[in-house]
Image: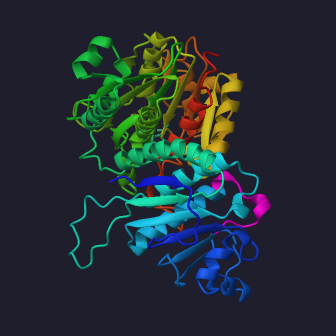
Amino acid sequence: MPLETAVIAAQPAGFATPLLAIGVGRGPLPASLAALDRDGGGALDRLFTAGDFSGKKDETALVYPPGAAARVLLVGLGKVDEISRAGIRRAASTAAKRARTIGVERAAFHLAPEALGSVAPADAGQAIAEGLAQGAWQFSEMKRAPDDKEKKPALERVDVLAPADTEAVGAGHRVGAAVGAGQSLARGIQVLPGNVCTPSFVAHAAEELAGRHGFGVTVLDKAAIGREQMGALLAVAQGSAEEPRFIVLEYKGAEGAPVVLIGKGVTFDTGGISIKPAQNMEDMKYDMSGAAAVLGTFEMLGRLKPPVHVVGLIPSTENMPSGTAVKPGDVVTSLSGKTIEVINTDAEGRLILCDALTYAQRFEPACVLDIATLTGAIVVALGHMASGVMGTDDQLIEDLRTAGERAGERVWPLPLWDEYRELMKSDIADVKNAGGRPAGSISAGWFLREFVDGFPWAHLDIAGTAYTDREDAARVKGPTGVGVRLFSEFVLSRQGSGTR
Ligand code: BES
Ligand code: MN
Ligand code: ZN
């Protein structure tokens, strides 16, 4: 059950709820909370004056004052002049996560107006909705159901209390709730193990989404992929008992050239014949996180119905070793006609993406963005704080950086200078698929660039950001749904701008 959230004009004082979470900045008890604290017998003020709580970033205090709310949770946002969308999103996430662990079905969230900083009310409404979805997310479907007496009810609804600027907060919330639902959908697909989330499962998820929202969907099975002559995708798929799929989604909320989003959908990456070590190999179920980001973005589009034109392309396959698997040294012919020497069967992502890049041409795109857990090297370069971005168009890269900053999903550029192209030259084919350890993310980018023809293009490497093993007050470990907020911000900022 996805979390339901709604903006209402109510004041926090007198609002009956099992849990009232309030975001506050650094300093004494905000004046706007005086009425609430009067009902509570001054408990909140005593908390501040005793020095037990000061609103520092990520600080929380759970109190049980008398009054309409059974519990009050204060969440610190830090210094007011430094409060950003990211901080508000984080506070809302902290509140939802705490509500979930306490085990309340309903809760309320209120951002003290003093803690708005320089953030516009609509942006705050969006960040709150995104944060609530973020913190409330959990995945327990594969665990045995707990006994009734141990069972905690799930958090079903959070009311966002906005007595001031209700309309602006509500408008932002509408966007944030759609983005949050998209991100939750992405996480719910990412988290599934490789024996459940197969290429045909990804295709069914796309069909379900398309059916529910009424967009166009086409799924190519192995035979159809063969007829299309996607030789690179087929080469990766040939070692697997699971059939590949090539998925095309189209949301047409406006005329004009589409934004094409391509997501890597490797449902499990063993490395193939160039097999990976066993340590952490289970994480390779997340190798379809790019595909999940595209599906999550379409969930947002389906909910918001903005006037934009977006096409989603998902090449999906497993990467398995077997007697029929592609071997190092094999030469395959891609959809573009270019031949590829497969140096390393573990560099499979670029093989399936290159055919999608060629396929994208037929849409005469305004731009093409691909998103992929592509290289371990990007984790070495940027760690887990940012996704890598490369491309052919400086403005596009700049737009993505801006979108990422606003969305709280940072991207950072790496250069695709001509000199790096050398790394991908093959002795016997047009290009090879692996260029060795130096500049591993850039050489992958250059490989993809060889297949970009006739449109502005950018590539996002999310190998370091797609999942996390860090759990904290605001964050749930596991899949992050990265890319959904970034793509949503990017796509929505193009509303009405037509083609570029
Ligand atoms: N799916 C991996 C990249 C990856 C690594 C994702 C770590 C998430 C965490 C990709 O298919 C891969 O194996 N890349 C190779 C490329 C190399 C063989 C040129 C890599 O990064 O080692
Ligand atoms: Mn691989
Ligand atoms: Zn991979």
Q: In this view, does 258 lie above or below 288?
A: above
User: In front: 499, or 128?
Assistant: 128
Boundaries of the magenta span: 76-86
**Residue 158 coordinates in the image, percent (x, y):** 46, 60
Q: In this view, does 396 lie above or below 68?
A: above
The residue positioned 50% from the left and 40% from the top of the image is 484
The residue positioned 58% from the left and 68% from the top of the image is 12
**Residue 307 coordinates in the image, percent (x, y):** 52, 24
Asked if one can make out residue 471 in the rendered structure from this viewpoint, the answer is no
Image quadrant assignment for residue 399: top right
The residue positioned 72% from the left and 72% from the top of the image is 30
**Residue 98 coordinates in the image, percent (x, y):** 48, 70
Asked if one can make out residue 99 in the rendered structure from this viewpoint, the answer is yes
- Residue that sits furthest to the right in the current view: 81
Left or right relative to 405: residue 313: left
Q: In which quarter of the image is the C terminus?
A: top right
Which colour style is shown?
rainbow
Q: Quadrant of the N terminus?
A: bottom left
**Residue 224 coordinates in the image, percent (x, y):** 25, 16
The residue positioned 33% from the left and 29% from the top of the image is 210
Q: Is residue 78 magenta?
A: yes
Number of numbered labels in the structure image = 0
Left or right relative to 429: residue 42: right
Q: Is residue 202 magenta?
A: no
User: In front: 499, or 409?
Assistant: 499
User: In front: 495, or 14?
Assistant: 14
